[in-house]
Image (spheres, helix red, strand yellow):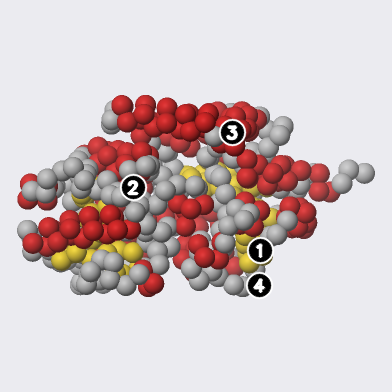
Amino acid sequence: MQNLANKVSNKKIKKIVFLVPLPICQWEEKKWCLSYLRSEGFQVDILDLSELIFSGLDIQKLVAQPLTADFVHRIYSFKELDHYLKMFSDDALFFDFLVGHADLTINKERVFRLLKKNRVRYTFLSIGMLPLPSILTVNKRMRLGIFFTRALNAFLNPYKFIDFIAAKGITFLTHHSFFYPQPIVIFGGGSEELTSYMINRNINEKRLVKIHSYDYDVAIFYKRSIDNSRKTNSQDICVFLDEAATHHSDYSLLGMEVANPMVYFAAMNRFFDFIESNSSLKVIIAAHPRSNYESMPGVFGERAVVKGNTVELVANSKLVVMHMSTSLSYAVLFKKPIIPIIIPGNRLSGQMSMLPQVLGEVIGSKAIDLDKDELTTALLQRECNIKKYAEYERLYVRTEGADDLPIWEIIVKTVKNM
């Protein structure tokens, strides 16, 4: 008799299992609406695979205040992961927060071989995307330079060269379901990355369930929370959408250079001083959820650093400053002028320099390079390009054809009908 683990289960889904590359915190617990999932009758489990994927790194130092609970399982070996997959595969749907529609890398491919071996049903969310540099004419010379720099670095470093070749082979194999599994359903919008992923893997568009972005959900919930008698009023504030550019954990995990703290904070504070001296606006820092400014007091001077209230700050602002944060969706939805800033102190990363320029072109607001551009009051004269804002909203925030429901309500409705 064929082993049950080698069959694709047709049982009704009773469990939702999240595959995560890092320990989660309360931010993810709230973002993924775990309490709501339980209220709808699902058992929820988190499989933390950080020890498998980032072996040798002190993960606990990278994630502040990780969530500890009986439903969070930290996996220490592939044998242990295999055990959990067998145990959960019969009546569970796995949510991949490891790869999604990105290329499968060497340090994660074994996870997906085990998913294939155990015939688990898995899915992923394709939301919160940013425009790709490749679809724009922004700085073609820079894009070409980045490509050749990466190729040269890979060629000169034997380990990187091996990784580079292996990654290309893995990417080719993912286009064929014989080696790695395909998602049984995909929850997402209409980004070019997802479209390319589905075409390359010959995934039928019927597997795509359309949903809006997280930011759209948050903005809608915020609007609903405001009393009809109390409309959102602009205040004399400029909001900086922080990305923890000097210490975000993702930079270390992805092998990317963080911004030099001395250069970064000096340049950003100089620009904030300029804004406050040449306008009636007071700058407030909307801290990234994974930032750790509690241990870095005073890096933004005496300015307020606020975590967990970005949507309200943007809704009540008159100007928004950002690098490449997906939270610019709030500024687009609430029609706020935006100033993109190239990250100072991070010149080694051409990709990081390029993205603010890309976003600036997409929304119709030219990016500022604090290392090169002279600060003049003309730089602060920004207006909303309504046409480009509407296009950005259509592609990256609010998905055409999606039910006008919160993300997890759409997911629950879909999963219950599987």
Q: Give the alpha-carbon distance from disc 2 to disc 4, as whole Å.
A: 40 Å
Q: In this orientation, does residue 135 appear?
A: no
Q: Which residue is mark 4?
A: 70
Amino acid at the residue labelled 1: Arg
Q: Earlier in the sequence, mark 1 or mark 2?
A: 1
Classify mark 3: helix, strand or loop. helix
Comparing 120 with 272, the one in front is: 272
Amino acid at the residue labelled 3: Pro
Q: Label 1: few (<14), some or many (≥20) within 10 Å?
A: some
Comparing 97 with 109, the one in front is: 109
Nearest-to-viewer mark from 1 and 3: 3
Q: Which residue is mark 1?
A: 74
Q: Earlier in the sequence, mark 3 or mark 4?
A: 4
Q: Give the alpha-carbon distance from disc 1 to disc 2, as whole Å.
A: 33 Å
Q: In this orientation, does residue 376 appear?
A: yes
Q: Give the alpha-carbon distance from disc 3 to disc 2, as whole Å.
A: 25 Å
Image side of residue 365 versus residue 343, left or right: left
- When asked about the image quadrant of residue 349, the answer is top left
Image side of residue 92 versus residue 7, left or right: left
Comparing 14 with 337, the one in front is: 337
Rendered view: 348 above or below 94: above
Amino acid at the residue labelled 4: Asp
Nearest-to-viewer mark from 3 and 4: 3
Nearest-to-viewer mark from 1 and 4: 1
Residue 342 x %, y %: 27, 46
Nearest-to-viewer mark from 3 and 2: 3
Rendered view: 284 above or below 21: below
Q: Which residue is mark 3?
A: 158
Nearest-to-viewer mark from 2 and 4: 2
Q: Give the alpha-carbon distance from disc 3 to disc 4, as whole Å.
A: 43 Å
